[in-house]
Image (cartoon, rainbow, N blue to C red):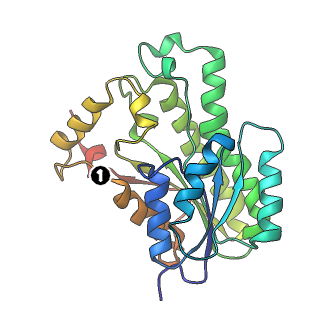
Amino acid sequence: MGLMSGKSVVIFGIANKRSIAWGITQALHREGARLALNYQNDRMEEPVRKLAAELPGDTFLAPCDVTVPGDIDRFFDRLGKEFGPIDGLVHCIAFAKREELGGHFVDTSLEGYQLAQHVSAWSLIGLAKGAAPLMEGRDAGIVCLSYYGAEKVVPNYNVMGVAKAALEASTRYLASDLGPRGVRVNAISAGPIKTVSAMGVADFSSLLDSMAQKSPLRRNVDQGDVGNTALFLLSHLSRGITGQTIYVDAGYSIMGA
C-alpha cells in the first residue's frame, strides 16, 4: 500500500516532463494516488494528454485557464461529476511577461504586475475556493510552489518575487480559512530548477551555479526532491502541518552572505 492509496489529487500546471508539476505527479502516482490534471488551452492539450497516458489508471483531464472567467468553476463542476471528491490539490501555476523578468523592478508595468499577480498568486485562491467543497472533511491538503525570491531580492526575478510573496501570504490566510473544514494549505519554496518557465528569467544559469556552490549540500535540487516533499505534505504524515513554507533548496536559504 502506498502513502496515497485510496486518495485523489488534482494537479494544475503540468507543461512537459521538465515541469516541477510532473515531478510531483510522478511521486503521487508512485504512491498510489488517483490523479486529475488540467491543461491550459487547446495548444497545451496534446502534450499534457501524452503525459497523462503514461499514468496507468483512471486519470481525469480537462481544460482550465485561470485567466478565463468561469473556467475554474467549470473545471470543478466537471471534476465533481466525473471524478468525485478529492484529497489534495497541487498548484504549480506561475507566469510573468519575459520583459518583466530582467532589468529593474522599478520599471514593472501595471499590466505586467497585474498579470503576474493574477496567474501566480490569485489563482491559488480561486482554485482553493473551487476545490474546497470537494475536499470538505477529508483531511485534505493543498500545496503550492514558491521560491526564495519571495523574501529576498534575487536579480531579475522582479515582479515574480512579489507575486510569490503574495502566494506565500495567501497560503497562510487560506490555511486559517480552510483549516476548520479539514483542509491544510502549505507552500514549498524550491531551489532553482531548469524548467521552461524558469529559463525565462534573465541569467537563470547563474542562479543554478550560485546554489550549487553555496548551499550546504553543494548541489541543485530537482523535480524528484520537490515531488517527494509534496507527497509528504499531501499524505497523512503531515496532518499536523499547515500554513507553512517548506524549503527544498539544499539548504541555500539558511546561508548568510
Q: Is residue 13 visible?
A: no
Q: Is residue 152 above or below residue 194?
A: above
Nearer the observer, 190 or 179: 190
Q: Is residue 27 above or below residue 93?
A: below
Q: Residues within 10 Å of mark 1 (few under 14, many from 20)?
A: many
Q: Is residue 71 above or below residue 149?
A: below
Judging by the rendered image, the residue that carries numbered circle 1 is: 221
Q: Where is residue 156, by image quadrant?
A: top left
SS for dot 1: loop
Residue 188, how many percent across, how many down? 46, 53
214 relative to 113 in the view: left or right? left
The residue that appears at 55% across and 50% down in the rendered structure is: 47
Q: Is residue 102 above or below residue 43?
A: above
The residue that appears at 61% across and 20% down in the rendered structure is: 112
Residue 216, how many percent across, how many down? 18, 50
The residue that appears at 26% across and 45% down in the rendered structure is: 252
63 relative to 94 in the view: left or right? right
55 relative to 174 in the view: left or right? left
129 relative to 96 in the view: left or right? right
Type of amino acid at the residue the image marks with label 1: Val
Residue extending farthest to the top is: 107
Residue 244, how many percent across, how many down? 50, 56
Residue 8, how many percent across, how many down? 63, 73
Residue extending farthest to the bottom is: 1
- Mark count: 1
Q: Quadrant of the C terminus?
A: top left
